[in-house]
Amino acid sequence: QNTSRAAQYLTRFKGAPVGHFVGGEFYTNDKTFTNKTPVDNSAIGEISAGSVTDMDKACEAAASAFPAWRDMPGAERKRILHHFADKIVERADEIALVESMDCGQPIRFMKQAAIRGAANFRFFADKAAEAANGLSLHQEEHTNFTVRSPIGPVGIITPWNTPFMLATWKIAPALASGCTIVHKPAEMTPLSAILLAEIAKDAGIPAGVWNTVNGFGQTVGKRLTEHPAIKAVALVGDSATGRRIMAQGAETLKRVHFELGGKNPIIVFDDADFDRALDAVVFMIYSLNGQRCTSSSRLLIQNGIKGQFLTALEKRVSNLKVGHPLDPNTEVGPLAHQEHFNKVMSYMTIAQEDGATTKVGGTDRKDLGEGCYVSPTLFTDADNTMRIAREEIFGPVLTTLSFDTEAEAIAIANDTDYGLSGYIWTENTGRAMRMAKHVESGMLWINSENNRNLPSPFGGVKSSGIGRDGGDWSFDFYMETKNVCVAH
Ligand code: NAD
């Protein structure tokens, strides 16, 4: 049933190429590239390869639309953005099916992701009316107060791992702040972004407030980060891309916000709740195909329970169901695209060369067809010098390290260039608090899976990012603060 609905939704992409959405109008270019589904690597349509001229038009459209959107009362922006969220909910089924086929994520997660996209809009919409409010600071002879105003047109650059949800996560606070946007979706997974643009038009978001340009990072992405009308760039992507964007935006002094890669530790102590910790270890790396920035790709297991824990883990990983992303029973779908599949598979060889043990998996799943399927993989007997312990593999691949003491766990956890998230499993509150202080990461979950709370800050340290999203942190990025000092 899912397959036939997906086929119905995808038919429309087989005709004219998917184009751009600029100044309220959809249009296409003659120059295109082929979009393939990772399910079987077959073509599911052509995508317009935007040029620098297309990006310039989009940035100019965002600049022209900015004053009216900025000056619209926050309550009215709130109404429009809620209307937009309603329309996401109406099309959630279509969004989930298209997204699964475009990026390989199992349907069981994508329906939730579509609904969460709507929730992102509602959350930030509700804050639109108060976003300009600042602080009031009284002195004997002066009163200082602050007001905030939207920074201007902004660039939003998103990756292919969960494209729909991540686009909404970035675009919602930008629009709620009063910024206009130019979105550059990942070239590998462009379909849900064009659905978002359709919904924007349908929901009555004024022309030019929302613009989408498809194409490659090194052409349209680069131009977006260099365009003088664009005042800030929010990127979700690789750390190397963050470095490039920072350099590209230097000339025009862009404000940047980066959500980048991770090599996140999940640290399980001897005294942890064994079954809950085991569930969390499995969920946090094998769900969403391991293509999740906050996935816990390093298991640090204390030696007292190592044998017992790894035996139970091996059994769980061996039983994960790999399959077609539209099968509701599928736990791990195909990786997002062939190039990424090749990258993940290369680590199967690297692990052997480095001397780790492949306890489970380590192979492709070509028995499932020509798609980008890999076996969920568990590496053991690893140490922190190995590439499988240091580099972001970004697939359903877990590297296991072990430790004796708390100090050793902290040293291993921090011995990485990354610092996005961490997970601690212990029943000892004092230890949990010490770990919370010493583990270098932007986010830490204690005795919990990745539970996202929209008002809380989200982001990384070290090579995992710059800045925080969530609650008022998002508004702080998309707005300028002005101080006004009044003499009494
Ligand atoms: P990527 O960096 O290759 O691409 C991200 C986006 O940047 C794409 O739209 C791409 O076209 C664009 N881009 C590439 N080069 C550019 C340039 N020079 N100028 C402007 N834009 C450019 O990342 P990816 O491979 O698509 O996504 C996977 C990465 O994203 C992983 O590292 C993952 O950890 C990270 N990620 C991080 C978070 C987070 O919240 N920290 C969330 C999801 C994904």
Image (cartoon, helix red, strand yellow):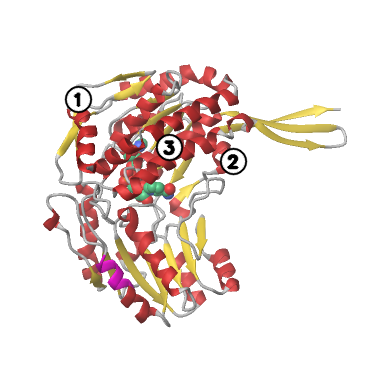
Q: Is residue 412 above or below residue 121?
A: below
Circle 2 packing at 10 Å, graded few (<14), some (14-19), many (20+), is some
The residue to which callout 3 is attached is: 168
Q: Look at the magenta stretch and give its main secondary structure.
A: helix
485 or 236, nearer to the observer: 236
Q: Name the residue under label 1.
A: 31
Using the image, tell me which numbered label, if any, was put on residue 472.
Answer: 2
Indicate yes or no whether the magenta region holds residue 398.
Answer: no
Q: Which of marks 2 and 1 is in front?
A: 2
128 w.r.t. 313: above or below: above
In what quadrant of the picture does the C terminus appear?
top right
Residues at marks 2 and 3 touching, judged by CB atoms closer than 8 Å: no
Q: Give the range drawn in magenta.
A: 313-319
What type is the residue that disc 3 sits on? Thr
CA distance separating discs 1 and 3: 28 Å
Q: What residue type is labelled 2?
A: Asp
Q: Position of residue 378 (x, y in %)?
A: 28, 68
Is residue 24 found left or right of 139 in the rendered image? Answer: left
